[in-house]
Image (cartoon, rainbow, N blue to C red):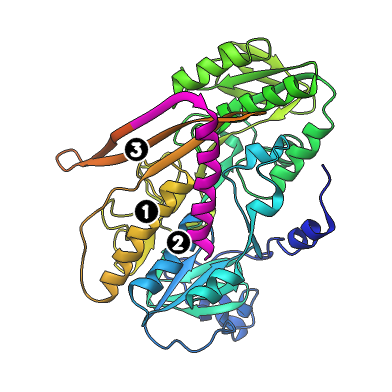
Amino acid sequence: MTTSRRDFIKLSGGAVLAAGTGCTGLGMTAQEAGGKEMGGAGPLAWIKLKAPLPKAKGQRVVVVGGGWSGLTIAKYVKKENPALDVVLIEKNSVFISCPLTNLYCVGSKDVDLEFLTHSYLDPARYNNYIYLQATVVGADFHSRKLYTSEGEVDYDYLCLSPGVELDYASFGVTDPAEEYHLRYTYPSGFMPGSEHLTIKEKLDNFDGGTYLVTVPTGNYRCLPGPYERACLVANYFKTEKIKGKVIVADANADITIKKEGFHGAFDTLYKDYVEYMPSFEITSVDAHGRKVMSDFGEVAFDDGTIYPRVRGSKLLEALNVVNPQSPQKEANIHPLHYNVIGQDRVFAAGDARPMPFSKSGNTSNSEGHHVAKVIAARAAGKEIPWQSPHTVCFSAVSYEPLQAIGVDALYSYNSKDKSFAFAHVKLKEEWSSQLGQTDIQWAKGMFRDLFA
């Protein structure tokens, strides 16, 4: 399946704006960033320009990041209090969903690029907030200013939802040239957009051999996603009569979620196609030689998706808001109120949060509804009690026919030891066509909530 001209035009506008220079820190003013000795004409002087935004008509709430979290927060802050002025800052020009892309990559008739791609202009227009396409490069929390590639933005309240980045150093890849070869040649498939186009093109041209799917440790984005991918690639090999084998190199001791459902699919639907290798924590990668190594040996492969651990966006480090206790460099926020510790006007949400909630679309969306209420209440001088995010996740185990398994869960908070745990978990581990269609309807409902 080739990319249509219409799809190409959509995607060509989605290139990331280059930040170009460094980042300013918490206490750095625009004058300091511009260079005092040169009268403000230093290498960052351009950030002192005002971003081309209408004058705020009320308290301004700025949301950074247009993923599932940021889109939800921008829309629902405005709904909670229409008098608030809301600006969503996102570096891309179009939204491409990461959820459901496994189905797209294998050519499912239920999910194409049109289904996954959405405009940022439409939800801003429908919901009366402002979308600014720009890259954030720094902030001054003292004077409440955000510095972007489009200039300076003043705010009254700020919410950071910059998502995650891939931590290739977590399995020994530290040389930039090696990292970029690995990123381009064997993309993880969990960063939305180009990765999925590449994976689909590679699968379309896969002639046979060993296809590697790796699973990281930690709280990575979309816990069931790599196992779903293994099932769907195996289904693709089976359907297209490709002499291929899928090796699942899992750094965890066992499948992390929906264990019975995925093991059942591996053992019955794809017993001749899938080899599951638990506790295979990658220590090094030879991308050119197509091998991954662990303490237990090495695995050779012909193609695949290599997924390192995830970490919080580097923007969090640039703004000095990283949780020192977070091994994944997530935001340092109050676990119940979402504000950055020491800053009652700056919040962080979505996959950047340190709480052990699922890094998934539905979780970020449901959390976003609550965080919007928190911010609107804070702007009115009020506080509201914590509310659990809601994790609803369907995983396809086949696309011909479309069949899926699922999980529905909330979270509980233990005030004594200040910990979170899953609560009211409902697992649906017997795959069915009904759950497969529910997966598609779930996505349609989520897209309506984000973009209508």
Q: Identify the residue position indicated by label 1 in the image.
A: 367
Q: Position of residue 318 (x, y in %)?
A: 50, 59
- Residue in view at x 29 percent, y 41 percent: 411
Q: Note whether residue 279 is visible.
A: no
Q: Position of residue 32 (x, y in %)?
A: 52, 77
Q: Is residue 449 left or right of residue 40?
A: left
Q: Is residue 34 left or right of residue 252?
A: right
Give the quarter of the figure containing the N terminus: top right
Q: Identify the residue position indicated by label 3 in the image.
A: 409
The kind of secondary structure element at disc 1 is helix
How many C-alpha atoms fall within 10 Å of the one at disc 2: few (<14), some, or many (≥20)? many
Q: Note whether residue 416 is visible.
A: yes
The kind of secondary structure element at disc 3 is strand
Q: Residue furthest front?
A: 434
The mark nearer the N terminus, 1 or 3, is 1
How many C-alpha atoms fall within 10 Å of the one at disc 1: few (<14), some, or many (≥20)? many
Q: Amino acid at mark 3?
A: Ala
Q: Are marks 1 and 2 in contact (CB under 8 Å)?
A: yes
The kind of secondary structure element at disc 2 is helix
How many C-alpha atoms fall within 10 Å of the one at disc 3: few (<14), some, or many (≥20)? some
Mark linked to residue 72: 2
Main secondary-structure element of the magenta-colored stretch: helix
| Residue 442 magenta | yes
Q: Amino acid at mark 1?
A: Glu
Q: Nearer the viewer, mark 1 or mark 3?
A: 3
The one of 373 and 332 positioned closer to us in this rendering: 373
User: What is the magenta range?
Assistant: 426-452
Q: Is residue 108 left or right of residue 325?
A: right
Mark 1 vs mark 2, CA separation in Å: 9 Å
- Residue in view at x 41 percent, y 47 percent: 363
Mark 3 vs mark 2, CA separation in Å: 20 Å
Mark 1 vs mark 3, CA separation in Å: 13 Å
